[in-house]
């Protein structure tokens, strides 16, 4: 595994993060959302909301499925870490990931987007409000992983 692969995945993550934060900025005037607002949104706002949700989910997924395993591989940490939770715990222990619990909460939010609740505006609004706040934290975690990777690559 080369550092160039890590760099490529980091670049993809940064693209998702940048576009998610752009959408978040556009939507900032309507947050926090109330359930009754969802059915009143115009098509352009819904499109931006879709961009936010999509990029949030893509960023969290890419970080979890590609970036974190690559960082673990980059560190050449010893041991057989087949379970994802074991990998997360190791990443937290070595300082690449600030908190396993926080990461699992972000994953739960991403998973909540996979379930559409068109008849439950309260639930939709609650999930969107949580993700709206969590988006900045996910980008902070991405930057922590980037700094960790860069420091580790310099020590190779």
Image: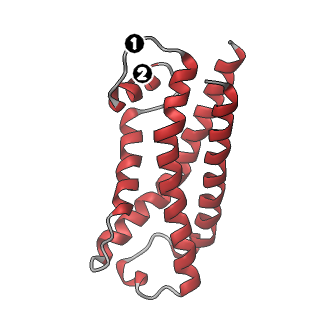
Question: Relative to 67, is 18 on the left or the right?
Answer: right
Vertical placement of residue 33 versus 41, above or below: above
> What residue sits right under mark 1 in the picture?
79
Quarter of the image where one finds residue 92: top left
Tell me which residue sits at (61%, 46%) in the image: 13
Question: Relative to 18, is 40 on the left or the right?
Answer: left
State yes or no: discs 1 and 2 in contact (Cβ < 8 Å).
yes
Q: Earlier in the sequence, mark 1 or mark 2?
A: 1
> What residue sits right under mark 2 in the picture?
90
Q: Please, what secondary structure does the residue beneath circle 2 have? A: helix
Tell me which residue sits at (66%, 55%) in the image: 18
What percent of the width, then of the height, locates residue 80?
37, 16
Quarter of the image where one finds residue 151: top right
What percent of the width, then of the height, locates residue 136?
55, 51
Residue furthest left as drawn: 119
- What is the number of the mark on residue 114? none
Quarter that holds the C terminus: top right
Tell me which residue sits at (40%, 26%) in the image: 87
């Amino acid at each position: 595994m080369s550092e160039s692969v890590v760099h490529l995945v980091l670049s993809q993550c940064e693209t998702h993060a940048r576009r998610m934060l752009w959408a978040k900025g556009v939507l900032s005037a309507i947050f926090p959302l109330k359930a009754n607002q969802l059915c009143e949104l115009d098509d352009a706002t819904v499109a931006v909301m879709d961009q936010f949700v999509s990029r949030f989910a893509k960023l969290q997924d890419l970080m979890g499925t590609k970036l974190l395993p690559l960082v673990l591989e980059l560190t050449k940490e010893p041991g057989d870490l087949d379970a994802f939770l074991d990998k997360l715990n190791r990443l937290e222990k070595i300082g690449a990931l600030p908190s396993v619990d926080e990461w699992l909460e972000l994953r739960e939010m991403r998973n909540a987007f996979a379930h559409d609740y068109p008849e439950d505006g309260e639930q939709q609004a609650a999930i969107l409000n949580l993700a709206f706040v969590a988006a900045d934290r996910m980008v902070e975690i991405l930057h922590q992983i980037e700094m960790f990777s860069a420091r580790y690559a310099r020590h190779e």
